[in-house]
Image (spheres, coloured by chain):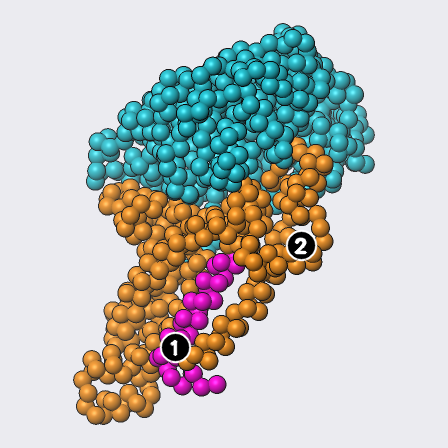
Chain colours: A cyan, B orange
């Protein structure tokens, strides 16, 4: 018997599964009798388990998903308008552009009944600053001072407009309990001040969360949330079909149609959550050095066809750094890189390459949804204008390692849910600047300006300018952002707490 | 028996040391964990900090020496992902894998050996051909495919058994059957050929000449001799079953070492991969030791040096 597990998570098998699941008549048992467990308990299948509940140790996507129930940050961005929502902090003010004073809600209890105070907030910042995976979120924080029991003052190295967005990732942990248990034990038996407490955790098997009676926002429904890690897409789907769970993460794209056609099930879609950038090495001695060539690559891609035919609509085309509903989107500049193969050809000729060019594009299989299929389609579209792409298949680790030392022509950067334009752009741009693949003084200036502009309207204008600058001299191939597709029992009332543009946390309660 | 056992246990030390060296080097040539564990936009300084925090910036021989030193004190390091003790997390998941593997072996033995005997007895018959065809088919099917097929039939269509998870005896059935399909054909074919081999030997002819009943000749005289190679294969295939458990566990969301180590490999969580391989290798070696002891019991000649 063959034991091939290399492609275990790849889609064709899920496709086979979906085909059989939904093609066979479900005659034996009437599944409508089963299904959702109602408000008392919600069962959710996620793609992986969390290693530690300590967000400063395990900050994987699934980890944050679960930890978000157990802990609260000072502030979260919620609702369809993506508005800053006070959680642990009741309100905040800026006495000066580099000082943020947070006034904590009084009477917030941790799950052990102790009160949450400014000391816990300071402690949580310290944990974040010491964590290699979380420190970027608080990189510009220079000092956290306790003013009184319920007031915290955060100093930043310069005006930091993106601070609030970054703080949505900084969960407040109980200092006393954390120190008493030690980091490792706390991660296994955590307590927080969130809406749910961990009632039971069988590693690799299930986490049972129970609604916290004394949650400052009132007890939440459902009373229990059971979370199971099921890595295999087909198995998650089978659990959903049989009513074993009410909600599943990541319905395999191939199966979405069948899920939609099944009256017992429904699809919940979050638009453009995962953003994928393809950095172009503009510094190495290749034709990519020429801005016109980089423009030609962007202009030669017919994104709509890719989205329709390959991604079956589960994504959003991007012709610039932000999506249409993100802060700083520039609708005029977005048109500049719209599909225009004739102009692409003309630009190539103008740049001195009438016979086309050869480029190498690094790809890791399984790194993003339909990666190989998408890149093959892109390659054939580019070929039509004379850009011959050699797809260089690398293992993800190798791809990133090469990229970090500038050893690539076109590479890949993946971003999942980011709250703020500064985080998206500054992150990818800082990387290219430090690694010297691409430099554009105007872009760099605008990044700093955007970060330092606290007024929201003025800030949006800066990002629109930045958008334009990044499109006019592209350092990336802008292609798409992929959706996150969840499945649920039709009778389940669960939906995303908030999803629009670059999306917020997925919470399994209302 | 005791000196034999002592000798075998001593041999365990260099074998396991060899395993640690191979795994230690293999995970390190697979790439730098900071690429996957830190955000893609982490600065070179962040990466360096991570490496020095975890001692990954020192020369490999020094890292290995320290690893072996810690190993002797029972410390297998801490996960790079969540900082938990690597040994603890592996041991936490080992019972589920052992349970699954043993259940699969049990089913394989229960079905495979009788099928092999019947096939041998009725050599050339339709029954024999069907059994061997079944064995060949079983061996050719991918574990993944079989697993999903079983889920479809018994969990989705018939609703007799749960789809996935580990929550009681009903949950082990489908994964154990899936995994057993890897061993079963092998056992059936081994038993069949081994029985046929034994029947050509003099002692069987003698038994028959004495006028013993065929049932006695088969079960009391031939089977014991025929089982020696079968037991050997079973021991060797235990490793294969553990490997097969990776796929099976993944399909059935079985919380064993398999799924966990797969994830650790993807993330380049060196200490966890090392601990998992070491633990599984130890289980494998001990099982083979057990098999050899069984072998000795079946054939006392082996004990002699």
Q: Which residue is mark 2?
A: B63
Tell me the subunit letter for badge 2. B
The reply to whether dot 2 and dot 1 touch (C-beta < 8 Å) is no
Give x and y (percent) for residue B291: 40, 72
- Prevailing secondary structure class for the magenta stretch in the rendered image: helix
- Residue range of the region highlighted in magenta in the rendering: B277-305
Q: Residue A427 magenta-drawn?
A: no
Is A271 drawn above or below residue A203 in the view shown?
A: above
Give x and y (percent) for residue A108: 45, 19
Q: Identify the residue at image location x=51%, y=20%.
A: A117
Q: In the rendered view of the protein, which quadrant contains the N terminus of chain B?
A: bottom left
Q: Which residue is mark 1?
A: B295
Is B213 drawn above or below residue B48 in the view shown?
A: below
Q: Quadrant of residue B242?
A: bottom left
Is B115 drawn above or below residue A77 in the view shown?
A: below
Tell me the subunit letter for badge 1. B
Q: Residue B288 magenta-drawn?
A: yes
């Amino acid at each position: 018997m063959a034991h091939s597990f290399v492609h275990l998570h790849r889609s064709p098998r899920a496709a086979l599964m979906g085909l059989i699941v939904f093609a066979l008549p479900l005659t034996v048992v009437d599944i409508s009798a089963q299904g959702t467990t109602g408000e008392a308990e919600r069962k959710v299948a996620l793609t992986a388990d969390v290693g530690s509940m300590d967000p400063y140790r395990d900050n994987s996507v699934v980890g944050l998903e679960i930890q978000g129930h157990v802990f609260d940050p000072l502030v979260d961005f919620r609702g369809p308008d993506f508005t800053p929502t006070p959680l642990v902090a009741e309100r905040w003010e800026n006495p000066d552009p580099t000082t943020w004073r947070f006034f904590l809600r009084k009477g917030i209890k941790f799950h052990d009944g102790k009160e949450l105070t400014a000391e816990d907030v300071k402690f949580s910042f310290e944990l974040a600053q010491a964590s290699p995976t979380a420190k970027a979120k608080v990189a510009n924080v220079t000092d956290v001072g306790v003013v009184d029991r319920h007031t915290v003052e955060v100093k930043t190295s310069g005006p930091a407009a993106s601070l609030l967005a970054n703080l949505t990732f900084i969960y407040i942990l109980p200092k006393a309990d954390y120190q008493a248990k030690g980091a490792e034990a706390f991660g296994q038996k955590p307590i927080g001040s969130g809406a749910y407490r961990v009632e039971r955790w069988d590693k690799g098997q299930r986490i049972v969360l129970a609604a916290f009676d004394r949650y400052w926002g009132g007890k939440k429904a459902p009373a229990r949330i059971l979370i199971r890690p099921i890595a295999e897409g087909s198995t998650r789907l089978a659990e959903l079909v049989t009513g074993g769970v009410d909600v599943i993460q990541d319905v395999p794209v191939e199966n979405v149609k069948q899920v939609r056609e099944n009256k017992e099930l429904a699809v919940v879609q979050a638009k453009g959550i995962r953003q994928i950038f393809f950095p172009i090495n503009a510094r190495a001695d290749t034709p990519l050095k020429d801005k016109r060539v980089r423009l030609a690559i962007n202009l030669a891609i017919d994104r709509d066809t890719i989205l329709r035919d390959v991604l079956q609509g589960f994504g959003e085309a991007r012709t610039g750094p932000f999506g249409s509903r993100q802060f700083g989107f520039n609708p005029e500049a977005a048109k500049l890189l719209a599909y225009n193969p004739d102009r692409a050809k003309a630009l190539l000729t103008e740049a001195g390459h009438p016979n086309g060019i050869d480029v190498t594009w690094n790809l890791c299989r399984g790194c993003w949804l339909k990666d190989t299929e998408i890149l093959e389609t892109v390659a054939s579209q580019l070929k039509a204008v004379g850009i011959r792409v050699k797809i260089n298949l690398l293992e993800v680790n190798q791809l990133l390692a090469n990229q970090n030392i500038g050893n690539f022509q076109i590479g890949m950067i993946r971003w999942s849910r980011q709250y703020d334009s500064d985080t998206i752009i500054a992150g990818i741009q800082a990387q290219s600047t430090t690694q010297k693949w691409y430099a554009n003084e105007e872009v760099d200036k605008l990044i700093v300006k955007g970060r330092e502009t606290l007024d929201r309207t003025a800030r949006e204008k800066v990002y629109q300018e930045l958008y334009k600058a990044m499109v006019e001299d592209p350092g990336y191939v802008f292609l798409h952002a992929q959706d996150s597709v969840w499945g649920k029992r039709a009778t389940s009332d669960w939906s995303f707490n908030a999803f629009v543009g670059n999306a917020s946390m997925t919470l399994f309660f209302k | 028996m005791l000196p034999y056992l002592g000798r075998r246990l001593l041999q365990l030390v260099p074998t396991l040391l060899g395993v640690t060296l191979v795994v230690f080097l293999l995970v390190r040539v697979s790439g730098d964990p900071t690429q996957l564990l830190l955000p893609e936009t982490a600065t070179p300084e962040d990466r360096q900090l991570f490496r020095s925090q975890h001692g990954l910036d020192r020369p490999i021989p020094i890292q290995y020496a320290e690893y072996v030193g810690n190993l002797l004190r029972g410390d297998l390091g801490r996960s790079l992902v969540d900082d938990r003790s690597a040994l603890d997390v592996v041991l936490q998941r080992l019972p589920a894998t052992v349970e699954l593997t043993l259940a699969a072996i049990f089913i394989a033995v229960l079905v495979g050996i009788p099928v092999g005997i019947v096939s041998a007895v009725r050599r050339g018959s339709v029954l024999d051909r069907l059994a061997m065809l079944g064995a060949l088919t079983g061996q050719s099917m991918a574990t993944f495919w079989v697993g999903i097929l079983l889920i479809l039939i018994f969990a989705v269509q018939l609703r007799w058994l749960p789809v996935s998870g580990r929550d009681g005896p009903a949950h082990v059935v489908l994964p154990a059957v899936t995994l057993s399909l890897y061993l079963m054909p092998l056992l059936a074919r081994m038993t069949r050929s081994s029985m046929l081999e034994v029947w050509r030997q003099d002692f069987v002819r003698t038994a028959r000449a004495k006028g013993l009943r065929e049932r006695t000749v088969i079960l009391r005289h031939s089977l014991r001799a025929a089982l020696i190679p079968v037991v050997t294969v079973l021991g060797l295939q235990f490793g294969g079953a553990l490997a097969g458990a990776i796929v099976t566990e993944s399909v059935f969301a079985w919380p064993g070492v398999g799924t966990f180590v797969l994830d650790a490999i993807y993330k380049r969580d060196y200490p966890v991969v090392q601990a998992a391989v070491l633990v599984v290798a130890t289980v494998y070696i001990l099982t083979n030791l057990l098999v050899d002891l069984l072998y000795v019991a079946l054939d006392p000649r082996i004990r002699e040096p």
